[in-house]
Image: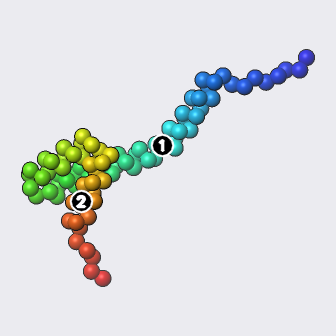
Amino acid sequence: MIAMSTPPPLAFSFLGGLKILFFLALPFALLGTAFWIWMLVDCLLNETDPQQTLIWITVIIFVPFVGAPLYFGLRKIRRTPPTKT
């Protein structure tokens, strides 16, 4: 009698797909977290007005996917002086 190979159960192939997705998403998650922490620390160290600092910290913490890039675009880039060549 010829032994026929059966496909793996659906649960195993589904979990294998999740594992691949996890390893593909991990670098993006780590970079996003590092960027979020960088913007949080930058805000704490470089904002001069305490009221503005509190507002930006609140925005960065509670709306991280929007707050950190928004802070970077509106505050960090403007504060960085252009380099002279």
Disc 1 crowd rating (10 Å Cα; few below 14, some 14-19, many 20+) is few
Q: Residue at x 28, y 50 (%)?
A: 68
Identity of the residue furthest to the left in this view:
50
Q: Quadrant of the C terminus?
A: bottom left
Compared with 74, 2 (above or below) is above
Kind of element beneath mark 2? helix
- The answer to whether any part of residue 38 appears in the image is no
Quarter where residue 46 is shown: bottom left
Disc 2 crowd rating (10 Å Cα; few below 14, some 14-19, many 20+) is few
Query: x, y (%) of residue 17?
Result: 58, 34
Residue identified by numbered label 2:
74
Q: Quadrant of the N terminus?
A: top right
Residue identified by numbered label 1:
25
Upstream in sequence: badge 1 or badge 2? 1
Q: Residue at x 40, y 46 (%)?
A: 30
Query: x, y (%) of residue 58?
Result: 19, 43
Compared with 5, 30 (above or below) is below
Identity of the residue furthest to the top in this view:
1
Q: CA distance from mark 1 to mark 2?
A: 28 Å
Query: x, y (%) of residue 83?
Result: 27, 76
Badge 2 amino acid: Leu
Badge 1 amino acid: Ala
Residue 81 - label: none
Compared with 8, 52 (above or below) is below
Q: Residue at x 30, y 53 (%)?
A: 69
